[in-house]
Image (spheres, rainbow, N blue to C red):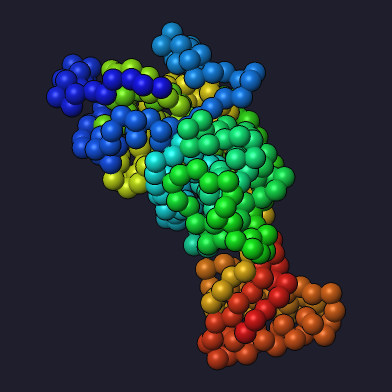
């Protein structure tokens, strides 16, 4: 979808006239050509869902959802999952590059944050493969860098099949027919246990405050590419397309959602942005969706055993692994369980690292 890019000086003038709360700058997006900018969008509604044009029309007509204060639902006035009681439950900002794979990035980010939040382990190790989600699961539905995807479909695939870890399919921008997936990928697999469509801003705030981050899709206008800081509100410029991100918080004092983008750290507030309530159909289009839980099966290599616990019950031993937390030692026989426990004791005593198969919080195999 072609639209005319904005002149920076004219945009600055328009922002000043509007008394805008955000500032423009030279970003990683403004340095691209118009074609390169637009391809970094990628929300494609399936039949029966609100189209991009319908979402944009509803926003322009002022058909936005009422956003109540969080206090009315018993939630804090502001939540930022990068600093929740001093802990950061999000993962690092990534860059989707020259491909309309934003839905995969937004979905994976929500899975990662939800896993860390649900396990109450902000330092937990999780890095899932956007390439696996988009170039394998999305490609199976005919999705490409040019036509994008839809978050509900991505969540269904994440539940039914799962998403492997980044080393099993490292992301590079550009269409691939699942060609980079390595053998043994199913040994490192995260699965969504279920997802919930959030039908009101109150539900969005409640979910963020109590469960984790959520997906957020919205209409992008030309002025958004120049966003550098502040609370974004659309001021001028034509519609460029639809985009999906991770919503990691809200702030009632500023009247905005806090989001993590996938355009690298050279855009916005080091890759993040704030967008005013009621803007660009972010509360009413494509969900939003929250993830109920994420199970994880993966090999954890080079971890330290920092604590052990057991009692007189059979097969009731636990190990505390650095960066992971407590894990139960599980096997089908007493002999195997005792052997695994002996390996863990030796590793703790010697201060050596171990490789473990962590299957939904249970240790199934150990290489010491």
Residue at horizontal 71 percent and vertical 83 percent from the top: 341
Residue 68 or residue 353, whichever sits in front: 353
Residue 23 or residue 29, whichever sits in front: 29
Residue 184: quarter of image: bottom right
User: How many labels sit on residues?
Assistant: 0
Residue 298 position in % (x across, y down): 63, 64
Drawn side of residue 240 relative to residue 236, left or right: right
Residue at horizontal 59 percent and vertical 49 percent from the top: 178
Residue at horizontal 62 percent and vertical 69 percent from the top: 299
Residue at horizontal 58 percent and vertical 46 percent from the top: 177
Evaluate whether residue 216 shows in this view. no
Evaluate whether residue 362 shows in this view. yes
Drawn side of residue 10 relative to residue 306, left or right: left
Identify the image quadrant of the C terminus.
Answer: bottom right
Residue 155 position in % (x across, y down): 63, 40
Drawn side of residue 55 relative to residue 16, left or right: right
Identify the image quadrant of the N terminus.
Answer: top left
């Amino acid at each position: 979808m072609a639209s005319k890019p904005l002149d920076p000086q004219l945009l600055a003038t328009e922002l000043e006239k509007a008394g805008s709360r955000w500032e423009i700058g030279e970003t990683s997006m403004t340095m691209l050509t118009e074609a390169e900018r637009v391809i970094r969008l990628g929300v494609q509604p399936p039949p029966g869902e609100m189209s991009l044009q319908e979402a944009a029309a509803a926003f322009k007509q002022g058909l936005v959802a009422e956003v109540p204060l969080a206090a009315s639902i018993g939630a804090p006035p502001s939540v930022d999952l990068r600093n929740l009681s001093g802990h950061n439950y999000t993962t690092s900002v990534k860059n989707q590059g020259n491909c309309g794979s934003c839905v995969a990035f937004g979905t994976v980010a929500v899975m990662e944050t939800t896993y860390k939040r649900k396990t109450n382990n902000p330092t937990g190790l999780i890095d899932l493969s956007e390439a696996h989600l988009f170039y394998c699961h999305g490609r199976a539905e005919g999705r490409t860098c040019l036509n994008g995807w839809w978050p509900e479909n991505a969540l269904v695939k994440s539940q039914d099949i799962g998403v492997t870890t980044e080393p099993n399919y490292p992301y590079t921008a550009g269409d691939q027919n699942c060609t980079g997936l390595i053998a043994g990928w199913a040994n490192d697999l995260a699965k969504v246990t279920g997802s919930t469509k959030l039908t009101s801003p109150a539900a969005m705030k409640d979910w963020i405050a109590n469960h984790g981050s959520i997906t957020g899709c919205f209409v992008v206008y030309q002025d958004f590419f120049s966003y550098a800081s502040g609370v974004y509100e659309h001021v001028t410029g034509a519609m460029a397309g639809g985009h999906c991100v991770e919503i990691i918080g809200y702030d009632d004092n500023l009247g905005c959602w806090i989001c993590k983008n996938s355009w690298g750290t050279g855009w916005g507030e080091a890759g993040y942005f704030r967008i005013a309530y009621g803007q660009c159909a972010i509360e009413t289009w494509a969900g939003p969706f929250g993830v109920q839980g994420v199970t994880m099966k993966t090999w954890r290599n080079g971890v330290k055993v920092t604590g052990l616990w057991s009692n007189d019950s059979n097969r009731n031993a636990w190990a505390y692994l650095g960066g992971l937390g407590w894990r139960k030692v599980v096997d089908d026989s007493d002999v195997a369980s005792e052997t695994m426990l002996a390996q863990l004791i030796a590793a703790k005593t010697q201060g050596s690292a171990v490789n473990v198969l962590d299957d939904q919080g249970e240790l199934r195999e150990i290489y010491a």
